[in-house]
Image (cartoon, rainbow, N blue to C red):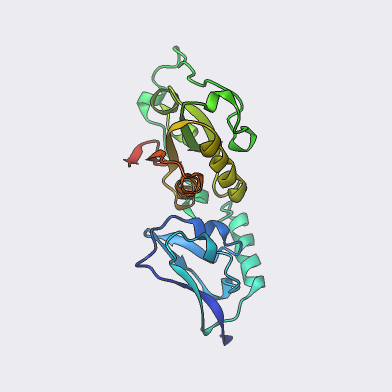
């Protein structure tokens, strides 16, 4: 094992709240959220450059010098290739293949179409200008891309009476989304902000995005968080 004294990240678990912002920024995939805490999964995946440092809202990550395996870019690429081959492009549960049968109640009635509660277009956060009229005096709903597919009653239970913006904290441009949401909160009269995300760890980055945008806007916007399970159930409402 090739060990050397070098710079590498250190995570203070007592400070970590599991928001996932660090894992989103780690291009090498060295960090994962495990049991609600950020973990360094292997020394040789961490390049020690600290791209994750400025993303942690709790100050739970620092750079230290210690004996560790050398950074191995080839190992990073091999790991990525292995996940692609297994149809799991990252190690988080959001990419884990899972099969299950739909609930009987979800397929029992196919004769009565459900009404749409969508009030505007576009819905992608990247495409919605902060000056748009439908955001004025709005209760804003920020949802992850996967939520409407997992939760059958999305229109009825969440979208009704809300202006909608859609984003993915892992696959989209996180920084651009945070700036756009900050601009919306700053320029519009947003009465409340509800964030609906999936239970997978990387999706919780949407909550971090919302909190940072509220802080940057200087507004006292009410924030509500809803977590949806991959089986289509509501896991928690905060």
Which residue is located at x 48 percent, y 32 percent? 148
Left or right of residue 13: residue 4: right
**In the rendering, at what x and y percent does residue 158 appear?**
41, 28
Can you tell which quarter of the image residue 39 is in?
bottom left
Residue shown at 49% from the left, 33% from the top: 149
Viewer-proximal residue among 80 and 186: 186
Q: Position of residue 67 (x, y in %)?
A: 52, 86
Image quarter hosting the N terminus: bottom right
* Residue 232 percent across, percent down from the top left: 40, 36
**Count of number-bearing discs:** 0
Q: Quadrant of the C terminus?
A: top left
Q: Nearer the viewer, residue 7 or 213?
A: 213
Q: Please name the residue shown 60% across and 81% down the image.
A: 70
Coordinates of residue 173 in the picture (x, y in percent) = 62, 48
Q: Residue at x 64, y 61 (%)?
A: 81
Hey, which quadrant is residue 237 in on the image? top left
Image: 97 above or below 232: below
Is residue 91 among what the camera can see? no
Picture layout, residue 125 above or below residue 6: above
Q: Is residue 90 visible?
A: yes
Answer above or below: position of 116 versus 1.
above
**In the image, 169: left or right of 114?**
right
């Amino acid at each position: 094992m090739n060990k050397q004294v070098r710079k590498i990240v250190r995570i203070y678990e007592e400070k970590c709240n599991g928001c996932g912002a660090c894992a989103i920024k780690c291009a090498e995939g060295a960090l994962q959220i495990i049991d609600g805490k950020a973990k360094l999964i292997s020394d040789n995946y961490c390049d020690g450059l600290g791209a994750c440092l400025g993303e942690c809202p709790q100050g739970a990550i620092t750079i230290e010098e210690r004996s560790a395996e050398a950074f191995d870019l080839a190992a990073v690429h091999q790991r990525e290739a292995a996940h692609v081959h297994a149809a799991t492009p990252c190690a988080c549960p959001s990419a884990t293949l899972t099969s299950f049968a739909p609930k009987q109640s979800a397929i029992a009635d196919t004769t009565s179409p459900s009404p749409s509660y969508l009030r505007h277009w576009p819905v992608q956060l990247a495409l919605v200008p902060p000056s748009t009229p439908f955001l004025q005096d709005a209760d804003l709903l920020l949802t992850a891309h996967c939520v409407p597919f997992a939760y059958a009653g999305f229109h009825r239970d969440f979208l009704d009476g809300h202006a909608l913006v859609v984003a993915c904290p892992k696959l989209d441009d996180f920084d651009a989304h945070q700036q756009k949401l900050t601009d919306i909160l700053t320029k519009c009269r947003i009465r409340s902000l509800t964030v609906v995300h999936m239970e997978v760890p990387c999706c919780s980055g949407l909550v971090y995005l919302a909190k940072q945008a509220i802080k940057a806007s200087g507004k006292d916007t009410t924030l509500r968080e809803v977590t949806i399970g991959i089986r289509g159930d509501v896991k928690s409402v905060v």
